Image: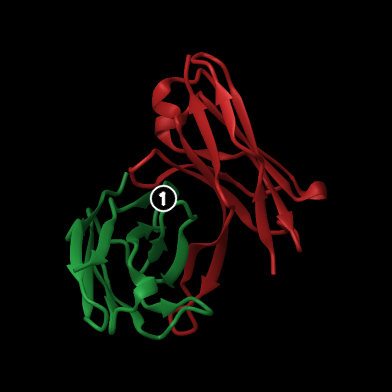
Amino acid sequence: QVQLVQSGAEVRKPGSSVTVSCKASGGTFSNYAINWVRQATGQGLEWMGSIIPNFGPANYAQNFQGRVTITADESTSAAYMELTSLRSEDTAVYYCARRQQRKDMYSSAWYDSFDIWGQGTMVTVSS
Amino acid sequence: DIQMTQSPSSLSASVGDRVTITCRASQSISKSLNWYLQKPGRAPKLLIYAASSLQSGVPSRFSGSGSGTDFTLTISSLQPEDFATYYCQQSFSTTVTFGPGTKVDIK
């Protein structure tokens, strides 16, 4: 069973950047989109963007356009999320998650969900 | 972006209770609705996908229904390990959005 293992906690100063990694253990990313979701303390889940390794450019949420870069390397089964121009409001736990696509047997429609999640990486932005 | 709302925002229940959580989308999303459970300090866990399909390994006391804009998650008999926060998520649009969550705690 594939597991997603993320890099450890980070502390950054406002204005700096952070990169969080997400590596597949026990399998590969092949043909799966990797998504990034963040959660500020006590808050809900916020989708940041996604990428399909070796398939094309990443797709980003409007709120993060220009500040986030998501990359992936299928050869190493790793994905990366870089967030720049950090501010205190970026203090949060950052998760990677695999998108699973399943076809409905009756309608032939495809449905997406995030079936495997990394353990989360705490990023603290503080002066 | 498609906005997701959930009700209630929190509820108190006892072990063995039947619990229902609702989720509403700001526009029709067909059956592109997923439910997750999250415990403090842990990553979310997928319970239901495509509105009503049970994720492998999830107990059958969890069920989902709905299509279009209105959806429901039901726990038929609440167990101690079910006290957590539940989120709905729409995957209809490229920009995925989550509901604000429903916290289920012990009465």
- Dot 1 falls on a residue whose secondary structure is loop
In percent of width and height, residue B27 lies at 24, 56
Residue in front for this viewpoint, A78 or B67? A78
Residue under numbered circle 1: B96
Quarter occupied by residue B37 = bottom left
Question: Image height check: is A119 above or below A8?
Answer: below
Judge left or right: residue B98 versus residue B55.
left
Residue in front for this viewpoint, B102 or A126? A126
Question: Image height check: is B5 above or below A43?
Answer: below
Q: Tell me what residue is drawn at x 77 percent, y 49 percent.
A: A74
In percent of width and height, residue B63 lies at 34, 80
Amino acid at dot 1: Val
Is residue B43 visible in the rendered image? The answer is yes
Chain that is red in the image: A
Judge left or right: residue B20 versus residue B29.
left
Q: Quadrant of the N terminus of chain A?
A: bottom right
Q: Tell me what residue is drawn at x 71 percent, y 56 percent.
A: A29
> Chain B appears what colour?
green
Quarter occupied by residue B83 = bottom left
Q: Tell me what residue is drawn at x 65 percent, y 55 percent.
A: A4
